[in-house]
Image (cartoon, rainbow, N blue to C red):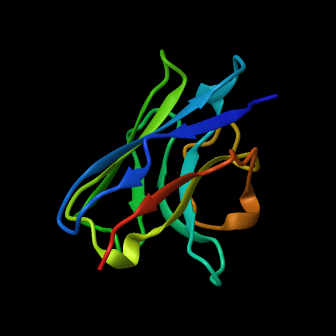
């Protein structure tokens, strides 16, 4: 069973950067594609970025493309989200999750129902 713990959130001015981390327990982390999602107050949880098992394939929401970078270190059981040029509309709680349906697959998807093992989330606030 994979358990996930996010960290690295905080308050940052517009145009600034943050690096989120998601540490996974268990020995099967490298078997799963991983994803980052976010949820702002009153909104649905939305897809942000995903990465394949090896890290060779990534996919981003249009709203973050060119500003955010997802990466992973399977030796450290950790997935990262580097966020640059932050905007007030990036304010949300950020969650990582594993794609349980795509275990041992290199397919990267954006479908929220394919993900589970959600962590507690980490708050990112970018004041306007």
**In x, y percent, where is residue 27?**
69, 17
**In x, y percent, where is residue 15?**
17, 65
Drawn side of residue 89 relative to residue 78, left or right = left
Quadrant where the N terminus sits is top right
Residue 5 position by quadrant: top right
> In the rendered view, would you say 21 is above or below 62?
above
Drawn side of residue 5 relative to residue 8, left or right = right
Residue 32 position by quadrant: top right
Who is closer to the viewer here, 43 or 31?
43
Residue at 62% over, 42% down: 105
Quadrant where the C terminus sits is bottom left
Who is closer to the viewer here, 125 or 77?
125
Residue at 68% over, 47% down: 120
Who is closer to the viewer here, 116 or 23?
23
Drawn side of residue 19 relative to residue 21, left or right = left
Residue at 73% over, 32% down: 3
From where the camera sits, is residue 107 visible? no
Residue at 48% over, 15% down: 75
**In x, y percent, where is residue 121?**
61, 51
Who is closer to the viewer here, 16 or 53?
16
> In the rendered view, would you say 83 is above or below 79?
below
Residue with the most extreme bottom position: 42
From where the camera sits, is residue 99 visible? yes
Residue with the most extreme right position: 1
> In the rendered view, would you say 108 is above or below 100?
below
**In x, y percent, where is residue 35?**
55, 51
> In the rendered view, would you say 82 is above or below 53?
below
């Amino acid at each position: 069973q994979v358990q996930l713990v996010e960290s690295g959130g905080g308050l940052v001015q517009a145009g600034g950067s943050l690096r989120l981390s998601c540490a996974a327990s268990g020995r099967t982390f490298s078997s799963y594609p991983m994803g980052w999602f976010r949820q702002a107050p009153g909104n649905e949880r939305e897809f942000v970025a995903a990465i394949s098992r090896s890290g060779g394939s990534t996919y981003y929401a249009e709203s973050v493309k060119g500003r955010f970078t997802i990466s992973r270190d399977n030796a450290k059981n950790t997935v990262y989200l580097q966020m640059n040029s932050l905007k007030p509309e990036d304010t949300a709680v950020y969650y990582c999750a594993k794609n349980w349906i795509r275990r041992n697959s290199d397919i990267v998807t954006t479908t929220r129902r394919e993900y589970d093992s959600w962590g507690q989330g980490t708050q990112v606030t970018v004041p306007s």
